[in-house]
Image: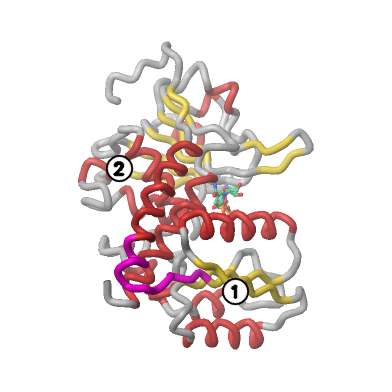
Amino acid sequence: MSSLNAHTRPLILDGKAIGNQIQKEIKQQVDEFIFRTKRQPTLAVVLVGGDPASQVYVAHKEKGCAKVGLASQRHFLPEATTTGELLALVQQLNADPAVTGILVQLPLPKQIDGTAVLDAIDWRKDVDAFHPTNVGLLSQGRPRFLPCTPFGILQVLYRSGIKVAGKRVVVIGRSDIVGKPIAAMLVQRTGPFGPDFANATVTICHSQTPQLEEVTRSGDILIAAIGQPKFVTAEMVKPGAVVIDVGINRLESGLVGDVDYDGLLPTVSAITPVPGGIGPLTVTMLLHNTLLAARLQWGE
Ligand code: NAD
């Protein structure tokens, strides 16, 4: 990929196809696991309230489980649920040996202490990798679970042959879900795909970064996780850069990402579309983590 030429057609990174391929591989691994252990890993999906986007995400997760042969349980609680009630459910799921993964869909209603809830999940069942133990292990370069969206980004880069070692990576956004963990993964000496897909020089930008455009233009790889439609314009991108658009913004015209996709096409060497880029990988890596959690708990 070092010979990427800004003047040829950019490579469109097809997350949907990559996600489907990984799901096929996971299905085979799940089948083998169930054959050997005679037990089916189970993901408990917890949704509090009726947020429409969350309902869609939860449905995708349940469908994904069924597709690869994992079981799922749904626990839908009313909008007015208290922190205590949700913690009681989490404790019940922690104690249930049949439940191997627990996912609490975010965002939670305002009255709930989300940090207390995420902290309460047994870290061995923490398939989102938001528990401080899993975040700490990742930060130290010895992760058990990798958070789903950043893991999806790494899969897209790996399966598209885009090495990150020695590159300058700029991440826009410092969330605990995307920005911080993808930076933590790429800066390590090695990772799930070896040293070529780690060892980057990483810069994190955020809402208080001065001269943002100057920084983003230094990125050989630019990762946008901002939550603002078409925020990243061609002037903000180094010619020939690889652009990963994590954003999902719902406009009346449909879903758009955080980058101006059409505006960037003539400039970049590779880019993820929205939809069909990183989105499909998030569910896929959740399925991967659910199988991994079962292996951890059942001693496989
Ligand atoms: P967030 O709101 O938690 O964080 C957004 C970040 O963007 C913040 O750190 C903020 O500092 C930064 N930011 C905001 N305005 C900025 C500005 N003007 N200049 C520079 N930085 C700015 O968001 P998040 O949870 O990381 O999500 C980001 C986007 O990714 C959203 O569109 C979300 O829907 C999407 N997302 C997609 C997936 C997926 O599966 N593809 C998963 C998670 C999030």
Asked if residue 163 is among those painted magenta in the image, a careful observer would answer: no
Decide: few, some or many residues near mark 1? Use Cα within 10 Å; few <14, some 14-19, many ≥20: some
In the image, residue 141 lies at what x, y percent?
26, 60
In the image, residue 260 lies at what x, y percent?
60, 29
- Point 66% across, 86% down: residue: 85
**SS at mark 1?**
helix
Ligand 1 under 8 Å from disc 2 Cβ: no
- Dot 1 amino acid type: Gly
In the image, residue 160 lies at what x, y percent?
35, 33
Q: In the displayed structure, does residue 297 sit left or right of residue 265?
A: left
- Point 43% across, 49% down: residue: 23
Image quadrant occupied by the C terminus: bottom left
Verify CB contact (< 8 Å) between mark 2 and mark 1.
no
Q: Which mark is on residue 114?
A: 1
Q: Which residues are magenta?
A: 32-43
Furthest residue toward top: 7
Q: Which mark is on residue 202?
A: none
Ligand 1 under 8 Å from disc 1 Cβ: no
Towards the viewer: 234 or 54? 54
In the image, residue 259 lies at what x, y percent?
57, 33
- Dot 2 amino acid type: Thr
Q: In the displayed structure, does residue 124 sit left or right of residue 261?
A: left
- Point 30% across, 49% down: residue: 187
Q: Is residue 174 visible?
A: no
Q: Earlier in the sequence, mark 2 or mark 1?
A: 1
Asked where in the image residue 138 lies, by quadrant, the reply is bottom left
- Point 35% across, 69% down: residue: 136
**SS at mark 2?**
strand
Q: Is residue 274 above or below residue 205?
A: above
Q: Which residue is mark 2?
A: 201
Decide: few, some or many residues near mark 2? Use Cα within 10 Å; few <14, some 14-19, many ≥20: some
